[in-house]
Amino acid sequence: MTRLIWLLWLTLISGSLAIFEDQVGKLDWRKELVGCPNNVVFDKVERGSDRIILTTDEDILSALSLNTGEIAWRRILEKRTNPSYTPVVSTSDQDYIYTVSDEGRSIRVFRKADGVLNWQYLLDEEKSEIADIITTSTNIFVTNSRKIAIFEKNRETPIGVHNLPAGVRFSKFVRSADEILNLVIRENSQSIDVRSVSPENVEVVRSIQGNVKNIEKCEIVGENLVCYHSDSLTVFNVQSGTSKDISTALTITQIGGNSKYLIVRSQSSVKIYGENLLEVAKIDGKYDAFSLSNDYLILASKGEIRVVSLQNGNVLFKTNLASSETRVSPRRIYASSTKDIELIVIGEDCKIEMIVIEIGKQAIIEWKREESLMRISAVEMVDLPLSESQQLIEDEFDEQQHNIISAFIRRIVVQIGQIRRWAIRSVEQLFAITATFSSKNGNGFSDFVKSVKQSASTSFSKDGPFERDLFNIRKLIIVSTLDGVIFGLDSAGGDILWRFYLGENFSPLKSEISGNSQLPLFVQRTTAHYQLNGQASVIFSDSVTSNGIIVSFNPITGEIVSREVLGGKIKRVSLLPNIDKSTHVHPLIILQTNGAIKYFPEIEEVQGSLHMLDVEKDNRIVGGLKINLAKKTIKKVWSGNLGLSQNDQIIAIKGKPYNQKVHSQGRVLIDRNVQYKYINPNLAAIAAINPTSQILTIILVDVVSGQIVHSASIGKAAGPVHFVHSENWLAYSYWSEKGRRTELGIIELYESSDSPSQKETFNSLIPTEHAPVVMTQAYIYANGVEAMSVSETEQGLTTRSILLALPCGNIHEVSKRILDATRPFEVTQAMREEMIIGYMPEIPIATEEMINYNQTIHRVRGIKAAPAGLESTSLVLAYGTDLFFTRLTPSGTFDILKDDFDHVLISLVLTALVVGSYVAKRWARANALAAQWA
Amino acid sequence: MSLSQWKLDYSHSSRNCRTSDNSFNPPGFYSTSAAIQHNIENENSANQQEHLARKRAWDTAIGPVKSLPMNMFMMYMAGGGVSIFPIMMVGMMLWRPFKTLLSVNTIFKPLESPATGSMILHKIIFVLGNIGAICLGVYKVHTMGLLPNTPSDWLEFIPQAGRAQYSIVDDTYF
């Protein structure tokens, strides 16, 4: 019964966290993305808007409006586990799109108009590296590396399945004159098998002799199979079963074409071959991509687009795209021509551009989409620069002068400046209001009020000066993506303020622990020092020489300040806690694989030492390094295997942010005593999993001394493991094989009661008499977890919330009060008065606690939380397939008035009361006087 | 102020007073005998009044002490919850004795008479009683958990510890 009451109470609390309908999109925004396309199909319809249908590297099928680039619909299919496996392949007819997805296992049919799944069929249990699909007017033919399946268009079961022999490395369909043929190349085979495919039967009709050196370099061009190898081209005629070799005298990088023409591209030129493989034309120049449409060949390079006639190779149109220095070479282009040529250009930086070419006239970029945002690696949030008035105030207190008169004059000047700014702003606002009023003449009062409100809100949030707002809630979000693009986003609406590309030879760094690619991003100087510009840096490696490169830039404008190439490979890079006194820059410390230590920027005066955790993943050896910053020497202080066994795999290590603020140093017990938190800033958490015995080991180790503070093993556990390490606690999620469910665990560390409670500084080398008290608890979580993070606030006073990204696309906010190791099993009356929540095995998942309500975001890879100027507020950006940004108030908005706070009503009531009391006073006096006279 | 502020003295006679002329006296009234009688009664009542004054003074002095058990009972009945009524009761409990403490002299002024003599002892007892009442109130506040006398009340003022060593836990790249 009591539990029921508590549950009710919990739901009441969480109910107040949810937002109201009119707040939707007010404090948050979502950016939907489709990913880097690997195939684009133009879908021109007679009625309705034209679309393009994309399949992308991220295995997303989507339809974009051709005119605006907006997403019409989007279907997120299973992500490939291995990038070498086949992406989603698709073909379409009038009404439907037919796809093979999930690594060649599923066939799915979607309706073109709205992306509704019409039917699906599981083709194969096993994954396949290759897949192809083709349709006729009545049938669908699908192949993967093991079979050919034949479907009727309106039936979701195959009418025939033909098994292919083992070792198939290539299997594609060719639409020949009146039949569908299937080409199969087997491993180590000297021939290409051609099968005739029809709904009735599948049989080998002929086999073409020929040696294919590299199957990746084979493509179906028209009715032929064309393979290339350095400068030689082999064309296999499927109909006749003959093959022909030609030497192009060029190192071929790409081939393509249609049934009439064959296009061969090399580094320095493009050749067009016509019928009977006769060379029609040769166009010199370095082009990165080409596409055919009707009689046109469209060639694209970094700064130029050229339209060439296929018949004779004459240049029909040529245009230089503006600002070619900032442009990135195209990766693929797709063209469609009716009257004008519509060109979709996909750059190396995953930017989709739609260019309309009117031959003989002009080329216009209609729209663009930044799809590299789907592969975000690191996120930082930077304060906006101080406003002019704030700067004046800073100036005023910065002066060391103590002359009263000059200080007074300065004060007056500052105030005049403030008044002037206020006057200018209000005049501008007034103009805006009158403009909106005059433009919407006489649509009633409500319209007027609405327009005034709108203009007020827009002038403050979007078009206002780019400076810090009152509560420092608007920030600049710097994002580094694995495609090598750095973005500056406005947190107010998600607009891209600036972007730059890191260059052709960009290659991200590869993490040793997780094996993921990373593009580390560091903010070295914030905008707090208003006389100096901010500085941020990204670190990556050169794809050719694999040397490290540091690019530093101004985070507010995106201007690149410097680009420094290091003389070796990067092993580690971190932000030094020390600060350069003169420049206020936190230098980066870079450890290279050859053992050299570098600072960026170089600093002279540096003392002290720094400790680092060194993990050898393969040998399961964990060690502590001590770096003498002045002498640039590394010393191994301790090392050991921390009790990890042969089969344990280290899956993650997590430290704590070096400047994390913890306001409350203890936990209040029910007898009003304090249990002090064990806040060790040098504590690192190491998670290791043993797949054979299914044991998850979590070790908390002091980086400085190597002392194992706590070690826990969880039996019958499996990945995925996510964890969050903050303050004095560690929260983790894992899959419990025993309960067949996801569980959340929490470990909290407290000082043992008789140790000194108050310390000036925390020193890891001073031994404690007793080990810290460890409290642990585990909870059932009735949902999967894709990513885990924790909220951050300015002073660390607000109760933290743990953010869990769920596979269904929601982000669940769980208060630390609920995911707590100290929840008692029995709640006494005194505890109830203190509002302590008793232990329940399950963490309730209420829809009100989803911070992104119905704005689902999928495949979340990370959640970044940053403090706002208000203590109650934390800014959160979740990134994955989409971006979602919101404000989070883990303990409610205790320091701001509610959104629906009625200032007008309250001031009206107050004035009415004051006026009323005065009137009543006079009245009473007059009455009293009259009574006396009577 | 003495209790006998004014009196009608029949024994006294003056020339312009009607009572000086015996012929105006009602039958059977002799001013001399009335005066004697009055004198005797006066002597009696003076004793009694002295006694009464002392008694009143002591009553006032012991009053706060006497109300202590009653207050204890009331506090017990108020309960330990921090809600409006117990808070109001405890507030009154603390405020009333405090206010009285500030006006001890004014309270004892009407009781002052030559009969009672010095009231310093009374005042001391009175003050002690009030202090007792305040102590009772403070104890009640303590039991309600409103006094900042435990470490938990000062927890938020403990500064975050600095750090002697800096450490970095970061990824390594290959």
Image (cartoon, rainbow, N blue to C red):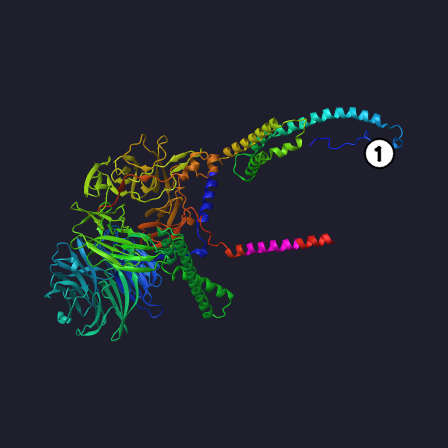
Residue A486, compared with residue B112, is above or below; it is below
Residue placed most toward the observer, A346 or A224? A346
Q: Is A619 left, or right, of B88 in this rendering?
A: left
Residue placed most toward the observer, B123 or A477? B123
Residue A720 appears at what percent x and percent y? 29, 44
Q: Main secondary structure of the magenta part?
A: helix
Residue B10, compared with residue A297, is above or below; it is above
Q: Which residue is mark 1?
A: B15
Residue A905 appears at what percent x and percent y? 53, 56
Residue A631 appears at what percent x and percent y? 19, 43
Q: Label 1 is placed on what type of residue?
A: Arg
Residue A854 visible in image: no
Residue A878 appears at what percent x and percent y? 34, 52
Q: Which residues are magenta?
A: A908-924
Tell me the quarter of the image containing the C terminus of chain A.
bottom right
Q: Which secondary structure, mark 1?
A: loop
Residue placed most toward the observer, A308 or A146? A308
Residue beneath the point at 72% across and 52% down: A932
Q: Residue furthest front?
A: B15
Q: Quarter of the image holding residue A245?
A: bottom left
